[in-house]
Image (cartoon, helix red, strand yellow):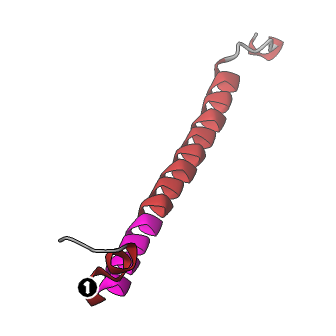
Amino acid sequence: MNWESWSQFWAMGGDGLYVWSAYLVAIVVIFTEIAVIGLTRRSILEHLGRYAKIARKERKPRNDDSRF
């Protein structure tokens, strides 16, 4: 398409509201997905960190004389 002015570009031949709202929704969905992925990653790393800490504690040799 060829627009003669910026106002015609933004109006998109009468379909501007639909076009720009579709872009807005797509951008919001993409940024929301990125945020959810980041929060999920952080949660998984925290969980793995707690698991690793517990695993290290369980592998520590005990100075327990009650074995004899």
Q: Quadrant of the C terminus?
A: top right
Which residues fall within the magenta stretch? 15-29
The residue that appears at 41% across and 74% down in the rendered structure is: 25
- Residue 54 higher or lower than 46, as above or below: above
Query: Mark 1: which secondary structure?
Result: helix
Closer to us: 57 or 46: 46
- Tell me residue 48's x, y (percent): 57, 36
In the picture, measured across the screen, residue 12 lies left or right of residue 45, that is left
- Residue drawn 60% across the image and 42% down it: 47
Residue 54 place in picture, x, y as percent = 67, 32
- The residue lying toward the viewer, choosing from 67 and 63, is 63
Report the residue marked by disc 1.
13
Measured from the top left, where is residue 55 in percent x and y? Answer: 62, 27
Q: Is residue 10 magenta?
A: no
The reply, left or right, for residue 55 in relation to residue 5 is right
Image quarter where the N terminus lies is: bottom left
Q: Is residue 24 rendered magenta in the image?
A: yes
Left or right of residue 14, residue 52 in this image: right
Q: Measuring 53% from the left and 51% from the top, which residue is drawn there?
A: 40
* Magenta portion: prevailing SS class: helix
**Tag 1: amino acid:** Gly
Q: Given the current orientation, which residue lies at the most extreme left position? A: 1
- Relative depth, front residue between 5 and 31: 5
Neighbour class for label 1 at 10 Å: few (<14), some, many (≥20)? few
Residue at 48 percent of width and 59 percent of height: 31
